[in-house]
Structure formats: structure tokens, C-alpha cells
Amino acid sequence: MTNSFFKLITADGSARRGTLQLRHGIVETPTFMPVGTAGTVKGLTPDEVRSAHSQIILSNTYHLWLRPGLDLLVAAGGLHEFMQWHGPILTDSGGFQVFSLESRRTLDEQGVTFASHLDGSRHRFTPENVLAFQESVGVDVAMQLDVCVKLPANAQAIDESVRLSAEWAKRSAAARKRPEATALFAIMQGGLDLAARERSASAIVELDLPGYAIGGLSVGETREEMHRLARFSASLLPERKPRYLMGVGTVRDIVMAVDCGIDMFDCVYPTRCGRNGRAMTRRGEFAIRNAAYTRDFTPIDPECDCYVCTTFTRAYLAHLFRAGEMLGPRLLSYHNVYVLNALMREARTAIEAGAWAAFRDSVLEEA
């Protein structure tokens, strides 16, 4: 990956405005990535994801490895062709499953062995074969295999997470076969321990990789702790490389993270909320099934210009959910993704105009 991979255009305070030049297109930052774990953003077609102004989506190596598998993805012409999403794709490495499927895996110095949550079959993940999988399916950004610990964690668990993640980042960097096509990001760990995060950052930054992620947050800490650690962690990463905070997807958390100097975010939150009848707006969230909305003929958000808000009413959405119609979760998922993408577009404009602080405060006052 060349030095033009990431361009930092301007900054306003700590908030940054930049671009990522990826094989499948340019991504304007700061940006939110909808999660398409198994090769689909749940409930939405690629055209809908695109029309909601998504620039880049996230898929997951662990899930794609199990189903449909590497052979089929390669035979299909790669992940982009298989799912008919022709914009950039970032794939998580399965590191989150090291955390979330702790009872189904064994961890050692060389890698992780999972017992599949689908059928119990055993699968061996190493830094090398996880990267090879991501390169083989043609993704734009590949995350290293790492070790994330649940918070609160003791010092020994944190230190082991930092040590293994750093060692696996080095092994991943050495295993690259297509660096010109797939950018490798390393992941910082360290829990809530500032010294551990400093050690982690030092170890991965010296690898001079295209980008860096802040891991080990949104896994049990308080919101205040997450914001404090995100700001501290961002300060440890290179100014001229993209910074990615993993697993953040509410309006408030994303705005706070942009204010910390972070460029990229992902979360299942907007589509999960959509499937469960929770509408996101810049002025908070609400449950569309509530009785108050059964005769409410206003849009989900009168200030939103998405297809859902310019076409349907709260009453109609409430009816769809009460009737068990699949259109309800689809429409609300679309709206929620659109809300976060609109937030990012406005954030980029505010940073460019030198008006970030006013924009940040106005959003946080209402969120």
C-alpha cells in the first residue's frame, strides 16, 4: 500500500477529515461502516446500502470461513462479486470471536482453535491463514488476528492480550502476499490500563502498517471509560495513518469518537435496532411498537430526507411491526443506517468549515 493510502485533509481540534484510497473506491472520513457479518448487511440489498450513502461495509472472517467457505468465495470471484457489493470491504479477523465465543475456543501461542457454533467442527485460525483468507477473497482492508479480553480484566489477562496481539500483528505483517491490494490494520489492546495501551501501541506502530485499530473497548466498560480510553489510545497512533475504533455505533458515541481524533467506526447497532423496532434519530431513539405511534402520521424523523422518512409514517411502521411484516425491520434498518451516514457527512462538512465544536455540541445536546 502506497503512502497515498490515507490523506489527512484537515483537522479541527482533534477531529479529522481525510480520505482512504482503496482498491474498490475512495472512502471519505470520518466514516461509519455498516456490518455485513456473513456477506450481507442484514435485511438490506447492496443497492439499498449504497443509497443510504454507505461507502464501505464490514464482513467477518470467522463467519465467512465457516459458511460459505474459502473455496466457494474464490470460485465466485471473491467476496465483492459473490455479494454484489462493489465498494470497499473491511473484514474483521475473527478476533472478536476469540472474545465472544470464549467457551468454544482454545487459545495458544500460535493461534486459536474454534469449535464451530454451527456444527461443532474444529477450525484452526492463525495470524497467517486468517490474513491469507482475507487476501484470497479480495477485501480492501484486512484486520490482524488479535486477542480481546472482556472487561473488567486482571493485569495478567491484559498483558497476555497485549503480548499475543502484538506478536500476531508482526506475524501478519510478515505474511502479506498482496499489500498493494489489501491493506493490513493492526489492533491495539490494553483494556483500561493506560500503560498496557502504551506498550501495545508502541509494538504495532513500529510495524509501519497502513492503518491501526483501537480494540478492547465496547466490551463491558462504562461509556465514560470508553471515551477516556478512546481519546488516550488515539493520541498514541500516527497522525498520518487512519484510526479505527471497533464496535461503536450510537450517535453520541460516534460523535465523541470523532472528537477523539478517530476516523472509522463499525457496529451492528443500527441494523439490530432496526430489526427490533428501535428507531434512531439525532434527538434520541424510540420504540416504534409503542402505542403512542399507532396513529402518528408523521415521519420517523421529520428532518431526515431518507426514503423511509419521505414516504412512510410512524403509524405505518408501527403497523408493520405489530403485523409481523418483514418490511418493517427492513425499512427501519435502512433509516438507521442512513442516520449514521448523514451524521458522518455533516461531521465532515463541519470539520472542513472549522465548525466542529459547534456541531459536536449541538448533536450531543440533543442525542
Image (spheres, grey):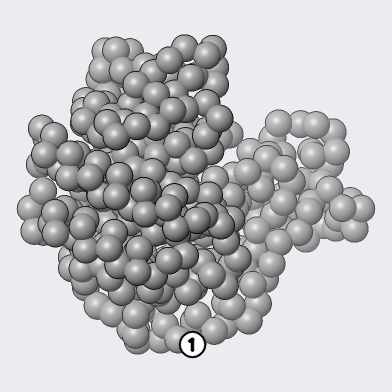
Is 202 or 184 nearer to us in this picture? 202
Can residue 124 be spotted in the picture?
Answer: yes
Q: Position of residue 165 (x, y in %)?
A: 30, 46
Compared to residue 31, the image places residue 59 above or below, namely above
Helix, strand or loop at disc 1?
helix
Compared to residue 283, the image places residue 95 above or below, namely above
Q: Which of the image's four quarters has the C terminus? A: bottom right
Q: Is residue 335 left or right of residue 276?
A: left
Compared to residue 201, the image places residue 288 above or below, namely above
The residue under the point 68% across, 40% down is 275
Is 142 or 335 nearer to us in this picture? 142
Q: Position of residue 300 (x, y in %)?
A: 71, 58
Task: Determine which quarter of the picture holds residue 355.
Answer: bottom left
Task: Determine which quarter of the picture holds residue 138.
Answer: top left
Would you call the spot at circle 1 few (<14 residues within 10 Å), some (14-19), or many (20 or more)?
Answer: few
Kind of residue sitting beneath label 1: Ala
The residue under the point 37% across, 54% down is 159
The residue under the point 79% across, 51% down is 288
Q: Residue furthest front?
A: 156
Compared to residue 327, the image places residue 33 above or below, namely below
The residue to which callout 1 is attached is 358
The residue under the point 90% across, 58% down is 292
Q: Position of residue 267 (x, y in %)?
A: 51, 50
Q: Position of residue 171 (x, y in %)?
A: 17, 39
Can residue 349 be spotted in the picture?
Answer: no
Q: Is residue 336 left or right of residue 174?
A: right
Is 13 or 310 nearer to us in this picture? 13
Q: Is residue 6 left or right of residue 290?
A: left
Task: Determine which quarter of the picture holds residue 7.
Answer: bottom left
